[in-house]
Image (cartoon, helix red, strand yellow):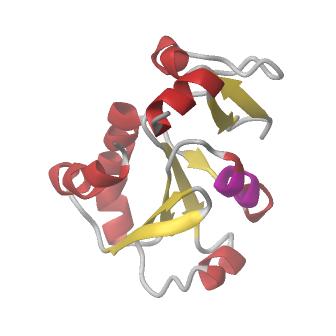
Amino acid sequence: MSDSTAASASGIHLVCGHCDSVVRIPADRLEQGPKCPKCHHGLFEGHPLELTAAAFERHLSRSGLPLIVDFWAPWCGPCKVMAPHYEEATRRLQTKARFAKVNSDDEPSLSARFGIRGIPTLIVFKQGREIARQSGAMDLGGLLRWLQPHVQ
């Protein structure tokens, strides 16, 4: 059985961005606007999740989709420039990956854990492991090209 067939048979686990509940969604329903059965918010809302250290581990370890995290800070010029491109990438790819942001100023323990030395830094996690990293701002085209092999 291929990975995609296995995912279709068992569904994909997602962590709700509002209540942090783990929800299993049949793969063929991802595009249909699924809602969390606990808090009734949409699981895909077209913008990145804002993760705290308390919620990060659950999203990292329990998501059946790749988790793409933008480590940023509100005072960072390149972060501000890239933010709308990251938002648009989230809208376009939200059912293929989970997009999140971590404010490095508010969550220094996460920045230290992942060795963030410059911002913005994007990290792609799959099954709880880091599989790709990119530092520096990207425009939408560059961001989508960089993400493409990781969100198939």
- On screen, residue 42 versus residue 133, left or right, reads right
Residues in magenta, as a range: 56-61
Image position of 37 with respect to 122: above or below: above
Residue 134, above or below 90: below
The percent position of residue 50, horizontal first and vertical second, equals 61, 50
Residue at figure coordinates x 39%, y 72% from the top left: 133
In this view, 1 is above or below 123: above
Magenta region, mostly helix, strand or loop? helix
Specify whether 124 is left or right of 149. right
Q: Residue at x 60, y 78 (%)?
A: 111
Report x, y in % for residue 100.
54, 51
- Left or right of 120 in this view: 147: left
Asked if residue 152 shows in the view, the reply is: yes
Q: Quadrant of residue 127?
A: bottom right
* Residue 145, position as x, y percentages in the image: 19, 53
Q: Residue furthest right?
A: 38
Question: Which residue lies most toward the left here?
Answer: 141
